[in-house]
Amino acid sequence: MEAKKKVRLIARLDVKGENLVKGIQLEGLRKLGDPHEFACRYYEQGIDELLYIDIVASLYGRNNLSEIVRRTCSDVFIPVTVGGGLRSVEDVRHILSMGADKAAINTAAIKDPTLITRVAESFGSQCMVLSIQAKKSRDRAGCWEAYYDNGRQHSGLDVVEWAKRGVELGAGEILLTSVDCEGLQQGMDLDLIRAVTSAVNVPVICGGGAGKAADLIAGAQAGASALAAAAILHYNKTDVPRLKAELRAGGLEVRA
Amino acid sequence: MKVTVIDYGLSNLLSVERALTHLGAQVEITGQADQIRQSGALVLPGVGAFRDGMAGLEKLGLIPVLREKCAQGTPLLGICLGMQMLFEESEEFGLHQGLGLIPGRVVRIPDRDAEGRPQRVPHISWDPLLVPQDGALARPGQDFAGTVLGAIQPGQECYFVHGYEAKPAGPQYRLADTAYGGRRVCAAAQKGRVIGFQFHPEKSGPVGLALLKSFLELCEN
């Protein structure tokens, strides 16, 4: 018997200063409102997890999310992952002390991969989410390069190799964002999802490009364990119960 | 209701504290043996590795204290790693002794599913609580009525995140299962007033809060 594929539906909340923002290919940000209000609304509607990313933190070497995370974690009782500007074990400890469950790390892990191991050893690998911003390589067909500083800087690292190395170093989960597709709402990079999910044995949260339920269903079928939705939820195109019903109708299993 | 959340240096205790506070409990967080000795209700949370968790308890001198409290019948709820530490031993990073409050051991979740296909570990998912097929605490084919899970129906989902799973030594300790990769995995275990939840009730939305409330009610009786 082939069991239905079960996926988690995660609301991704990109935050700049005090505002929830949404861009296109991580650029051209538009302010949408108070992130805490969005978080509470999604919780009440039955979202499975929340993902907060401070999108400018790594550029300026700071993390402003603490207060927003603290407020949200008083009111919602589902897993919360926080990323953006986390540079050390101490930064992770601080954000966990605000109520976060997992830390998503990109820039600092590229600059010093031993951070992955140190975070995993300090708080458990389930806490260490390796965030990878993937952009199609200009030089090598069928390959992707890992970017950092919110898609502005390229690392030279091959995404699939970096994902495998991250898992060896202790990452318990991967957050994979397609920079090429992000914000366009024209579908996810399914080749990227297939390449990464078949290379590692930890759950992979996939995001970037979903504009409708069918896009998320395709992402799940390509191998995603969890789907990060932003535009599709933030712009009130749908709500969580309707989106989940569509995922179910598309053959996926999701939490009731 | 006053509840003591045991702080042994590893964990993110805030989520558990907030959920219990939300339910109206008065929460005390401490790693001090004296305070724990006087407590009427204990919660042992936990994320991270078994070895580090037990080392944390050991360092604070809490292992004999917890055994003593359980012998006295003080309710104790272990969550995730806290549940796993209730068992006799774990094979995570070598063999390590647990608290031995519930017979059984903790083993790695296999990286193949029931049909031999690769499966992802850790198990991170919202999955249903099910009545164990050979259950003695909850009646097979029926519901959780009469147990600490009585507030919910079989099939309701909770949030799991774990790379290791508990194997209770007998059906009499197996309170609920979940399913992963076509296999049954222990989701909740119990011996007397010692209860373990593999899932995170503090992160399982309204369902999880209902279960924590049931534990608080059990503590009052």
Image: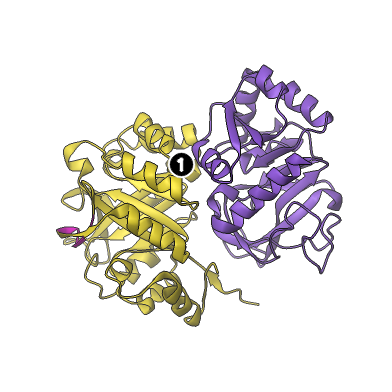
Which quadrant is home to the C terminus of chain A? Answer: bottom right
Q: Spot the residue most to the left.
A: A28
The shade of chain A is yellow
Which quadrant is home to the N terminus of chain A? Answer: bottom right
The segment highlighted magenta reads A20-28
Q: Decide: few, some or many residues near mark 1? Use Cα within 10 Å; few <14, some 14-19, many ≥20.
A: many
Letter of the chain shown purple in the rendering = B
Q: At numbered mark 1, what does the secondary structure look like: helix, strand or loop? A: loop
Magenta-colored stretch includes residue A23: yes
Q: Chain of mark 1?
A: A
Residue ID for mark 1: A170
User: In the rendered image of this protein, does residue A80 appear above or below residue B103?
Assistant: below
Q: Residue at x 42, y 43 (%)?
A: A100
Question: In the figure, residue B81 lies in which quadrant?
Answer: top right
Q: Is residue B90 left or right of residue A27?
A: right
**Where is residue A4 shown, x and y percent of the image?**
57, 74
Q: Residue at x 38, y 79 (%)?
A: A214
Q: Nearer the viewer, residue B26 or B11?
A: B26
Magenta-colored stretch includes residue B211: no
Question: In the figure, residue B141 lies in which quadrant?
Answer: bottom right
Q: Is residue A123 left or right of residue B27?
A: left
Is the magenta region chiefly helix, strand or loop? strand
User: In the rendered image of this protein, does residue A109 appear above or below residue B175?
Assistant: above
Residue A10 seen from this side: no
**Where is residue B45 shown, x and y percent of the image?**
60, 37
